[in-house]
Image (cartoon, helix red, strand yellow):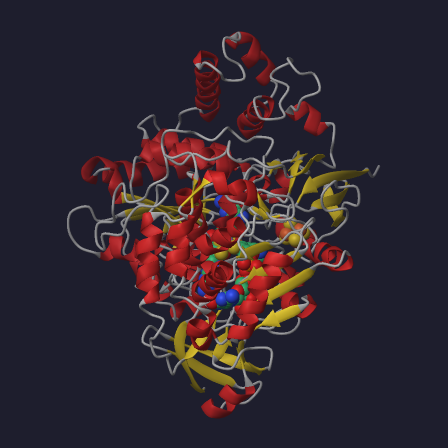
Amino acid sequence: MSETTTAFRTCPLCDATCGLEVRVEDGRVTRIRGDRDDVFSRGFICPKGSTLRQLHDDPDRLRAPLIRRGDRWEETSWENAFQMVESGLLPILEKHGPDAVAAYLGNPNVHTMGGLLYVRPLLKAIGTKNIFSAATVDQMPKHVSSGLMFGHADSIPVPDIDRTDYLLMLGANPLESNGSLATAPDWPGRIEALQERGGKLVVIDPRRTRTARVADEHLFIRPGTDSLLLFALVAVLFEEGLTSPGRLADMTHGIADVAARAAGFSPEAVAGRCGVESSAIRRIARELAAAPTAVVYGRIGTHTVEYGTVASWLVDVINVLIGGLDAPGGAMFPLAAHARPPRTGRPFRTGRWTSRVRDLPEVRGELPVATLADEIEGPGEGRVRALLTVAGNPVLSTPNGARLDRALASLEFMVGVDIYLNETTRHADVILPPPSPLSRAHYDFAFYQLSIRNIANYSPPTIPRNGEMAEWEILTRLALIVSGQGAGADPALADGFGIAATVNQAIDEPGSPIADRDAAEILGQLNRYRGPERILDYLLRTGPYGDRFGEDPDGLSLAKLIDHPHGIDLGPLQPRLPGLLTTASGKIELAPPPIMEESARLADTIGAAPTEDLLLVGRRHLRSNNSWMHNLEVLVKGEERCTLLIHPKDADAAGVRDGEEARVFNGNGSVSVRVEITEDIMPGVVSLPHGWGHDLPGVRLSVAVRRAGVNSNLLATSEAIDTLSGNAVLNGIPVTVSKG
Ligand SMILES: Nc1nc2c(c(=O)[nH]1)N[C@H]1C(S)=C(S)[C@@H](COP(=O)(O)OP(=O)(O)OC[C@H]3O[C@@H](n4cnc5c(=O)[nH]c(N)nc54)[C@H](O)[C@@H]3O)O[C@H]1N2
Ligand SMILES: Nc1nc2c(c(=O)[nH]1)N[C@H]1C(S)=C(S)[C@@H](COP(=O)(O)OP(=O)(O)OC[C@H]3O[C@@H](n4cnc5c(=O)[nH]c(N)nc54)[C@H](O)[C@@H]3O)O[C@H]1N2
Ligand code: SF4
Ligand SMILES: [Mo]
């Protein structure tokens, strides 16, 4: 007898949190489409959403732990695998101390409940200062500017695109990426709605992207110069008396300091460097000021550059100056269902420790991944000898991938928690694979904190696990091993102690939502769940909309989310200032000293002669996801994605022809890649996507190796970073193009 059921779940692949409708027949997923009843996405999905089925069925996806025997891999039992980890890691920890073990956390960690709730305890158990993550090839500048301005690195305002009249977007392409630091399923529909209500979208990007094409206006910009352009917008706002911070004025420090600093960045002074007409800069400043509501939003292209933190800060400076911060239609702070009140008394700072080799400051508890290879290869006391990667592929994702690749090969021991044997995990001694997304529960801890509406949605596992171990359990067992409790210690027991400790602490804490309540009663209610779900239930029930364990029967709990498979819409974003501010002054710090110093350095570059080289930028494609969905035939089939975009003038000058191979090189590396000539890219700029280069020996990616592409990060130097955040410079890289 055949049985067909329909399940609903949130897609965990990108930030957009689309609802999926999954048909399951006899325990097998037979179709995935958009969930039309999802409260947030209303049926929208992208081509990746439906491929969770192919990902689940991919024969190359690891189902059991692998251990290395010389050049060969052997499948092994979980018990054996953890034993190997214990005998590999413990001697290094004992002999060389915790810093000898580094960790790299990749992007999917923010897309799993296990990653978000159980990685931190594991890192704490190791006790290492050598923590690296994809954040320093991504959004770290936003954390730093938010930390300095608002007091907490995670107090990040998002563009209220559903209510704004004017959206100025720099360095983002949400029609391919589906948005980032602005969770919103269906950007195409939301942009259309903005235009239908008479609003305007202006896109600033060195490439005429899909988003630029639907925009009302698109301007090319020379890569790496957003900070100059944004400063010029600020200069015009002051010069022409267009600032109107409104209610923000009383909660803001440093407006005059910003005015004084910006004066040196007139549109006329920066126009040549940016490749944007000064008249256009002036007009956009006036339009921002005149629109009933307006917001500036910048992403990858403004962050992964030198002065990325200055650019990120300027985005919010403008939002403050036009009165758009914390106001509908401007840039607003989400309030997720699991959010905790902001901690006061410990304002954000960086540099609490520095890296050993390059003396780079810690930011948000981690070090720049651009210096990971230095820490492995740099001789002497304190060298990194072992590495744990969780859901990361730094060989392809981080600058100077070739050197990191060599460095990983020299490690004494490496553990990879990953679903593939890929360019990075091929260096591991043990690979521990978590289950496919369809076999786990999901609640989007990361992205509901960055969402343009307040939403809560929980998905139970769609199909049962088949001998696989939940990611939280893998991570907990690793934590137990490094804390000396042995490979056989029980993760469930440890998890039970964890939640009990959390509850008891909250009960003892005056003002907490469960202060003075009965611990046994509360734990009794929570104990219907285990692992991440139990923590989720706790966070929801003690969160801003929570039922506080029965005190507010209408409030949220996990049970209530389970009753709402299409999610619960908690409404549009609400103003949260000044309550959210946790700076020492309790105000918005518009002119934080570190950023003012960095801005002075930037001012000195205005007159610098522009480079003669072509400047390389990245790009994303709807059917790709960083470095790791290239093993699914449905996504990679069709035209080649990893090509070099180049303007006809530059192609002529380099003597390269459309469809032919060209060599792209600089002092760091060289790649050979097929050329695509297009007027959609600014003259002087070329573009390659990142995350390709699957032709390294020893990977188990039978589809991806056939369309390997090239690793654009061979051209990025690990020396170039944004000083304040440690973020790598991945856009605006000088290169030369010649006939292949
Ligand atoms: N040149 C250039 N480089 C870039 C960028 C760019 O724009 N240009 N973008 C940067 C950005 S924004 C990012 S976020 C990084 C991404 O950099 P990384 O996070 O290092 O790389 P990903 O490609 O996301 O790799 C994800 C890894 O996780 C594994 N995986 C997938 N799902 C799971 C899971 O559920 N659990 C576990 N344990 N593993 C899983 C995959 O097999 C893969 O190995 O790349 C950065 N690199
Ligand atoms: N399909 C797909 N979706 C994804 C991902 C993916 O790999 N594929 N990755 C996910 C991840 S981890 C992230 S962080 C997000 C990122 O999401 P987005 O920030 O939207 O990233 P991109 O699509 O790379 O867009 C960056 C744009 O910046 C432009 N740019 C480059 N340099 C400059 C510059 O100096 N100034 C300006 N103004 N523009 C510049 C590039 O031309 C490009 O169009 O996407 C997520 N979604
Ligand atoms: S846009 Fe993102 S969340 Fe939505 S279906 Fe595509 S990958 Fe999944
Ligand atoms: Mo990212």
Residue lying furthest front in this view? 241
Q: State the count of labels.
A: 0
The residue positioned 56% from the left and 56% from the top of the image is 296
* Residue 640, image quadrant: bottom right
Residue 57 appears in the rendering: no
The residue positioned 74% from the left and 44% from the top of the image is 22
Which one is in front, 712 or 581? 581
| Image side of residue 578 versus residue 382, left or right | right
| Image side of residue 445 versus residue 37, left or right | left
Which one is in front, 119 or 451? 451
| Image side of residue 615 versus residue 243, left or right | left
Question: Residue 522 appears at what percent x and percent y?
Answer: 56, 12
Which one is in front, 347 or 50? 347
Question: Residue 634 appears at what percent x and percent y?
Answer: 67, 62
The residue positioned 65% from the left and 51% from the top of the image is 293
Residue lying furthest right in this view? 1
- Vertical side of 495 occupied by 209: above or below: below
Residue 312 appears in the rendering: yes
Q: Quadrant of the C terminus?
A: bottom left
- Vertical side of 488 occupied by 17: above or below: below
- Vertical side of 288 occupied by 678: above or below: below
The residue positioned 60% from the left and 82% from the top of the image is 679
Which one is in front, 551 or 482? 551
- Vertical side of 687 occupied by 155: above or below: above
Q: Quadrant of the N terminus?
A: top right
* Residue 113, image quadrant: top right
Question: Residue 363 appears at what percent x and percent y?
Answer: 34, 45
Question: Residue 578 appears at what percent x and percent y?
Answer: 51, 34
